[in-house]
Image: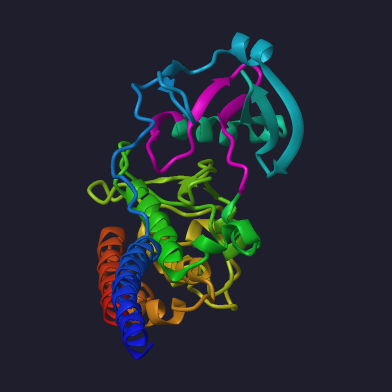
Amino acid sequence: MERKAQESKKGLTHREVPRVVGLLLAMALMNVVLYLCFDRFFISPQHSTKDPRSCPYGYFKMGQMKNCSPWLSCEELRTEVRQLKRVGEGAVKRVFLSEWKERKVALSRLTSLEMRDDFLCGLQMLKSLQSKHIVTLLGYCEEDNTILTEYHPLGSLSNLEETLNLSKYQNVNTWQHRLQLAMDYVGVINYLHHSPLGTLVMCDSNDLPKTLSQYLLTSNFSIVANDLDALPLVNHSSGTFVKCGHRELHGDFIAPEQLWPYGEDIPFHDDLMPSYDEKIDIWKIPDVSSFLLGHVEGSDMVRFHLFDIHKACKSQNPAERPTAQDILDTYQKVLNLLRDTVMSQTREML
């Protein structure tokens, strides 16, 4: 009886060995899976520098389209595009959710003939600036004062907080993705400052809400400029500078050189107002970026690392402000630094 008991104990020991090994293997496998998950979660998606929609001038490609298609003509816009409902309106145009070949598109119509010059200016900019930074032009008809562009259901950047608070977008409501959005925004400004047409200034940006309304949030959470009606050209070589409108501007959001410089004793007069250059866009970047970063966990850490470059953006002397490319480079360095720090801490945890 005693011998059988001893054999039984030996048998249990032999069976327990594989269990221990199996448990260790399972833990090792779980660590690998966790590491991969953390790696995927903490690294913000890298946006390709190449435009995936790249087509020759006068052509477009969107969504799942495999081939480039010519811009739609007046006849095609009249017969192939079905207007559904109004989704937006500004001083220059009304925007309607529409349908073209079972695809959702955005049809813009001129609000009044008084604004036609601005409307046509915006159309010309759309045609000339097509890139990954600009909403995709699908067609236009000057006779009917209509423009057709790609539809982005998430709407303008004004809706960012509302969108990210939805449960299905919680996985992208992180400082990594928000910093990438800020980089997208600065990327648009940098593109406009080095556009094929020259140095363009985003004049429709006299306050934060107005500025945010000029940009769209795409379904893959990147940013494209949408409203290009007010993009005057700066030419430093010829001494050509700009003024954003003909009325007196107020507030802290705009750059100091956009404010009336002669005090309250002298009434505002547009002819006396000095002009300025693209550095007014640089002044506004910290405020827009702060909005994009929001108040999620880690966003204050990002702000701390961006403090110096943002302080430089707020220099009273426009010439001392950094370029958009300088800011973009700094944002990328901060993203890499913080990402590497988080990854290092994650490895230590595992």
Q: Indicate the quadrant containing the C terminus: top left, top right, bottom left or bottom right.
A: bottom left
The residue located at (35%, 63%) in the rendering is: 33
Lateral position of residue 258 relative to residue 158, left or right: left
Q: Position of residue 125 (x, y in %)?
A: 45, 34
**Does residue 349 lie above or below 242 as drawn?**
below
Q: In the depicted view, which residue is nearer to us: 110 or 113?
A: 110
Question: At 35% across and 73% down in the image, what residue appears?
Answer: 19
Residue 337 x/y as whole percent: 25, 73
Q: Quadrant of residue 91?
A: top right
Q: Is residue 130 magenta?
A: yes
Q: Coloring scheme of the render? A: rainbow
Q: Residue 284, how many percent across, how many down?
A: 45, 66
Examine the rendering and report whether any part of residue 8 can be seen. Answer: yes
Q: Residue furthest front?
A: 1
Outermost residue, left direction? 237
The single residue placed furthest to the right in the displayed view is: 85
Indicate whether residue 45 is drawn in magenta: no
Visible in this render: residue 207?
no
Residues drawn in magenta = 127-155
Q: Residue at x 70, y 33 (%)?
A: 96
